[in-house]
Image (cartoon, rainbow, N blue to C red):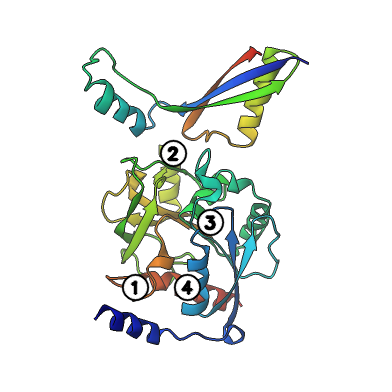
Amino acid sequence: MPNFQVSVVIENKPGISDPEGDTILNDLVLKAKNTNITKIHSGTILKFSIAEKNEKSAKDKVIKICDELRIYNPLVSKVTATAEKV
Amino acid sequence: MKISKIKACHQEIKFIPRNQRQIVKVGVIVFPGSNCDRDMYHVLTDVFKLKAEFFWHEKNLPKNIDAVVLPGGFSYGDRLRAGVIAAHSPIISDVKKLSEKGIPILGVCNGFQILVESGLLPGVLLKNESLNFMCEWTNLIVNNNKTPFTRKLKINQKIPIPIANGEGRYFVDNKTLSQLKKNNQIVFSYENKVNGSISQIAGVCNSDENVVGMMPHPERASEKEINPIDHKPSSLIFESLIESVGMKN
């Protein structure tokens, strides 16, 4: 079976305050006069290496693991996953 | 001067032999990274004369236990999210079974985080608004005095107590918040805005009121030697447990 790397990005749902993103924006990026930046979202990235038959099944399997083991908290976070063959 | 004060404090501590302590068995669960387990054990046994026993997170809990405490610390180094990995420990299934039987269960700080991540309590604990690890004294206000840990406290009673956490900002969605208020599940709130917790919530309970989680540390505030303000309100948390279990037995 081919190997895939599935990248899972965990970030806050809209409406959940993100003090880390706000701090990076207000105290670093905007202070450096990058005034065209309006928002920064912080998050966590996890990269899963997995042997699966195709990209879709690799992605589905990893999302299932994330759901079952509460790797992200669905109350406040959302996940997006992308898979690539390695 | 300082040395004599310390000596005076030590002279006041009376250690009761273990076999003369009250027969109320409290299980203190130890996870990899727990660091308030010994403090909790000391307060339960030496201050409140309870029988306490440590239980490693991979072990089972006995069925005849009277209460369970999940102490504070940094289980699994707070990796991924505080409490989430410990929430998958084998012992948590026993904690869930005991909670269904109405056994009093208290989670303090990381113990609270583990209880929410295991689904025993609603909500989630996010990073503090300041993003700082906060270690300071604060005042709690009692909102629910029907739980096994608050029955000797009065509504709106003030509890001077320390907090020590980086992820203590309690959050629930608006629908759940309404349910918590309606069901009287908010047990403690902060007197002042501390860390951005929704409705300044510091502690909640389940709908049966036997599982309580709180971010502040009552085990660090229940002895006069270490509480510079007033140790009695925090003491009532443990005295409530004694009364609750005593009444049940």
Does residue A61 appear to the left or right of B154 in the view shown?
A: right
* Discs 3 and 4 carry the same chain letter: yes
Crowding at mark 3 (Cα within 10 Å: few <14, some 14-19, many 20+)? some
* Observer able to see residue A55: yes
- Residue B231's label in the rendered image is 1
Q: Amino acid at mark 2?
A: Lys
**Element at label 1:** loop
Q: Amino acid at mark 3?
A: Ser
**Element at label 3:** loop
Question: Residue B167 at x, y = what percent?
Answer: 42, 45
Q: Amino acid at mark 1?
A: His
Q: Pointers 3 and 4 in contact (CB under 8 A)?
A: no
Does residue B199 appear to the left or right of B173 in the view shown?
A: left
First reached walking from the N terminus: tag 3 or tag 2: 3
Nearer mark to the viewer, of 1 and 4? 4
Q: Pointers 3 and 2 in contact (CB under 8 A)?
A: no
Crowding at mark 2 (Cα within 10 Å: few <14, some 14-19, many 20+)? few
First reached walking from the N terminus: tag 1 or tag 4: 4
In the figure, B232 relative to B58: above or below? below
Q: Chain of mark 2?
A: B
Quadrant location of the C terminus of chain B in the rendered image:
bottom right
Question: Residue B54 at x, y = what percent?
Answer: 61, 66
- The foreground one among B45 and B119 is B45
Q: Which residue is mark 4?
A: B43
* Real-space Cα separation, disc 1 to disc 4, in angstroms: 12 Å
Q: Which residue is mark 2?
A: B175
Q: Chain of mark 1?
A: B
